């Protein structure tokens, strides 16, 4: 029970940070980055992002993971809950995940592992750390 409470507290703090950053106005950073605290799996995956070279195999794996777990909610078009939520919160120009240029691999990894608002977290039994790294590189790399 205590682990669940800590998980919820960490998720709420990450959410609050994202809201604060999006509400600040003025100059915005080139990349949104939220650093997880105390989550060993996410930290390992984040370290792998910086040490893994983006090659064709990783890109294909990232595309496949995106297609299996993310596209139904985050692609363009009507009836995509992730796209609709992002449009309501951040505007239509930032609603399609693969069109965004302000995401960092660390933010993608953290969001996928911990979830955000109505997006559920994905456990390592669903998306492995190596698949998560490939996914983050694919999402960020599609629009750099």
Image: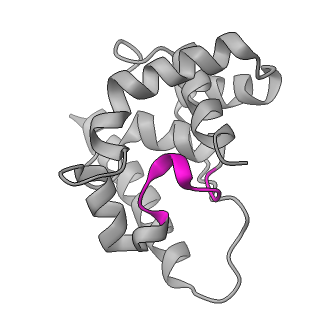
x and y percent of residue 38 in the render? 55, 37
Q: Nearer the viewer, residue 23 or 63?
A: 63
Q: Main secondary structure of the magenta part?
A: loop
x and y percent of residue 97 in the render? 47, 49
Query: Relative to 34, is 55 above or below?
Result: above
At a point 34% along the width and 27% down the height, the residue shown is 69
Residue 51 belongs to magenta span: no
Query: Relative to 110, is 51 above or below?
Result: above
Question: For the magenta stretch, what is the residue range?
Answer: 94-103
At a point 34% along the width and 16% down the height, the residue shown is 126
x and y percent of residue 7 in the render? 34, 41
How many marks on residues?
0
x and y percent of residue 30 in the render? 73, 64
Q: Nearer the viewer, residue 38 or 14?
A: 14
- Quadrant for the N terminus, please: top left
Left/right placement of residue 16 relative to residue 138 reads left
Left/right placement of residue 37 relative to residue 55 reads left
From this viewpoint, is residue 71 visible? yes
From this viewpoint, is residue 122 visible? no
Left/right placement of residue 90 relative to residue 21 reads left
At a point 39% along the width and 25% down the height, the residue shown is 67
Q: Quadrant of residue 54?
A: top right
Question: Which residue of the protein is positioned furthest toward the bottom in this rendering?
Answer: 26
Q: Nearer the viewer, residue 45 or 72?
A: 72
Display colour scheme:
one colour
Q: Quadrant of residue 15?
A: bottom left
């Amino acid at each position: 029970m205590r682990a669940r409470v800590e998980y919820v507290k960490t998720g709420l703090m990450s959410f609050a940070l994202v809201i604060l950053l999006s509400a600040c106005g003025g100059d915005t950073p080139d990349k949104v980055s939220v650093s997880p605290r105390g989550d060993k799996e996410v930290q390992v995956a984040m370290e792998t992002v910086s040490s893994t070279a983006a090659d064709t195999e990783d890109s294909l794996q990232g595309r496949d993971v995106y297609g299996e777990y993310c596209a139904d909610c985050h692609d363009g078009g009507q009836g995509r809950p992730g796209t609709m939520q992002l449009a309501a919160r951040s505007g239509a120009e930032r609603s399609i995940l693969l069109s965004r240029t302000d995401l960092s691999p660390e933010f993608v990894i953290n969001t996928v592992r911990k979830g955000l608002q109505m997006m559920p977290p994905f456990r390592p039994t669903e998306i492995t750390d190596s698949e998560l790294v490939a996914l983050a590189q694919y999402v960020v790399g599609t629009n750099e």
